[in-house]
Amino acid sequence: MTAERVREQRRRRNAFRKPVTSILRHAFLIVAAALMLYPVIWMVVSSFRPTDLIFREAGLVFDSFEISNYVDGWNALTYPFNVYLLNSGLVVIGSIIGNLVSCSLAAYAFARLEFTGKKFWFAIMLLSIMLPIHVIIVPQYVLFSQLGWVNTFLPLIVPKLLATDAFFIFLMVQFIRGIPRELDEAARIDGAGHPRIFLQIILPLMVPALATTTIFTFIWTWNDFFSQLIFLTKPSLYTVPLALNAFQDAQSSTDFGELFAMSVVSLIPIFLIFLFGQRFLIKGIATTGIK
């Protein structure tokens, strides 16, 4: 009887601890999420305030509702803001197509083909991940300047067609290695070569990895400021990050209301991409060995 009472007490104690632990865990996550989201929410609220009131209020209450920040900010620069959105869209689409095509082909070669120096070149590819862009930006600028590509979108898109993003190659290699080789062997028995195996067998199974590459490429390219600042100097070619930076250079006193309003507009595509693609992002990372 004593042992049964002890077990019963343990059950009751555990039954009490589980909901309490769950409540504390969720409360901690809610507080942490609120702290992380506060700057973004404050920016959204401030985009509807007059500039002279933005830094007087740190709260999140809509004490005023000024849509004029969005109207004036849209046409505050040399060109309407939709021009900069379109420029960013062109660079993003070109970068996504380039990474999907070139990185998937390079990953298939490293994962399935046998060639001389395979391990050496794979190691070089991994080492290039640790190479900062500041090291290669000067020779890149010299090369693209001699080709006459400065002030065009080519320096931002063409390198993507040459599989320069080693991170995505590594991600896809890990994914392809998880696909059973028996599928390749069965296709070879049917007379399929490497192009057919890649296009009809491997590529359809790589959808999570391809979606992950698409999302990351979109976010990184859309937010890229440094390389776009180097290669694009004409206002008509400005992308969204350069346009937002121009708000501070256009006049001696920055209109933060308009700046925050256009910053909110520039966040909408990233929010939508992440919202609709997060399940592919999680699945793609979870199945590539990056844990």
Image: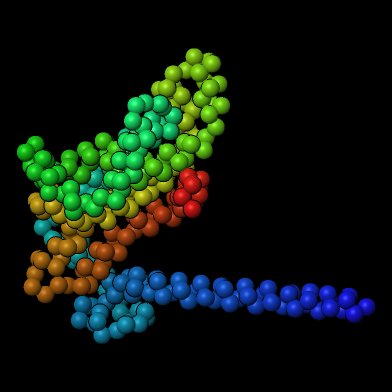
> Is residue 129 shown to the viewer in this render?
yes
Q: Position of residue 32 (x, y in %)?
A: 46, 74
State the residue in front, 237 or 232.
Answer: 232
Is 251 positioned to the left or the right of 102 in the image?
A: left
Q: Is residue 96 above or below residue 236?
A: above
Q: Quadrant of residue 15?
A: bottom right
x then y, percent, for residue 122: 35, 38
63 lies above or below 93: below
Q: Do we see residue 81 in this rendering?
A: no
Q: Residue at x 32, y 60 (%)?
A: 267
Residue 20: x and y in percent read 65, 78
Residue at point 30%, 46% (across, down): 127
In the rendered image, the quadrant that contains the N terminus is: bottom right
Residue 157 vs residue 90, the one in the foreground: 157
Farthest residue to the top: give it.
191
Q: How many marks?
A: 0
Does residue 10 appear to the left or right of 149 in the view shown?
right
Q: In the visual, does 116 lie left or right of 246?
A: right
Q: Residue furthest bottom?
A: 56
Instruction: Identify the coloring.
Output: rainbow
- Does 197 sit above or below residue 57? above
Percent from the top left, x then y, of residue 255?
A: 17, 72
Above or below, 258 relative to 118: below
Residue at position x 24%, y 53% from top? 132
Q: Residue at x 67, y 75 (%)?
A: 19
* Picture quadrant where residue 257 is located: bottom left
**View extreme (right): residue:** 1
Q: Quadrant of residue 116?
A: top left
